[in-house]
Image (spheres, grey):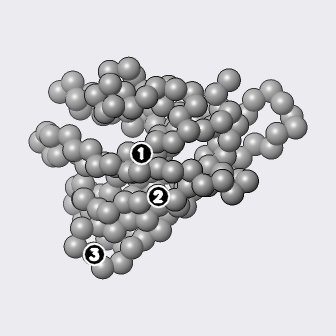
Amino acid sequence: MIRRTLLISLFALISACGGPGDSANIPEAQPAAATSADIGNYIVHFSAQTTDQLPPVVAREYNIVRSKNRAMLNVSVLRESDNLPSTAEVSVSTVNLTGQLKNITMREIREPGDVEAIYYIGDTTVANREVLVFDISIKPEGEETVAQVRFQRQFFSD
């Protein structure tokens, strides 16, 4: 039960995104229009946040360094027919607006329960006000086609 509560807290925190700072000279990136995408028979949920927003117990459990200068991506894949989690091959290519490649290695997390939760997380360094563009490739288990999802997020650390 505690793991389910932590998981729910994690997803609630992940959906949070900082606002613009007090400098009018830096353009504000538009937040992602959606946090999910339809890819055929599946729905992909995705979000990104700085890791300092994670509760310490969650960060320890999943070996995530809490920091305002680290961004974490969370991806989950659900079958549309029954809304149940699905395993998938998930890979990510991430760049900032200057074209600098950011390395993110995704790892699968499984949470036991009445219905096993399956999601994929990865993290990378991020500077204050940096905008990252995430290109996510998803191939659900048993599918032939790889789907692509793109979104961007601006991170604030002050």
Relative to 81, does residue 33 appear above or below in the rendering?
above
Q: Quadrant of residue 141?
A: bottom left
Asked if disc 3 and disc 1 are in contact, CB closer than 8 Å, the reply is no
- Determine the residue positioned at 29% across, 58% down: 78
Question: Which residue in the structure is indicated by mark 1?
Answer: 122
- Determine the residue positioned at 60% across, 55% down: 101
Q: CA distance from mark 2 to mark 1?
A: 9 Å
> Which mark, by number, is residue 143?
3
Question: Which residue in the structure is indicated by mark 2?
Answer: 92
Asked if disc 3 and disc 2 are in contact, CB closer than 8 Å, the reply is no
Query: If the image is split into quadrants, where does the N terminus sit?
Result: top left
Within-10-Å neighbours for mark 2: few <14, some 14–19, many 20+: some
- Determine the residue positioned at 22% across, 73% down: 142
Relative to 137, does residue 15 appear above or below in the rendering?
above
Q: Position of residue 72 (x, y in %)?
A: 47, 40
Relative to 114, does residue 147 appear above or below in the rendering?
below
Asked if disc 2 and disc 1 are in contact, CB closer than 8 Å, the reply is yes
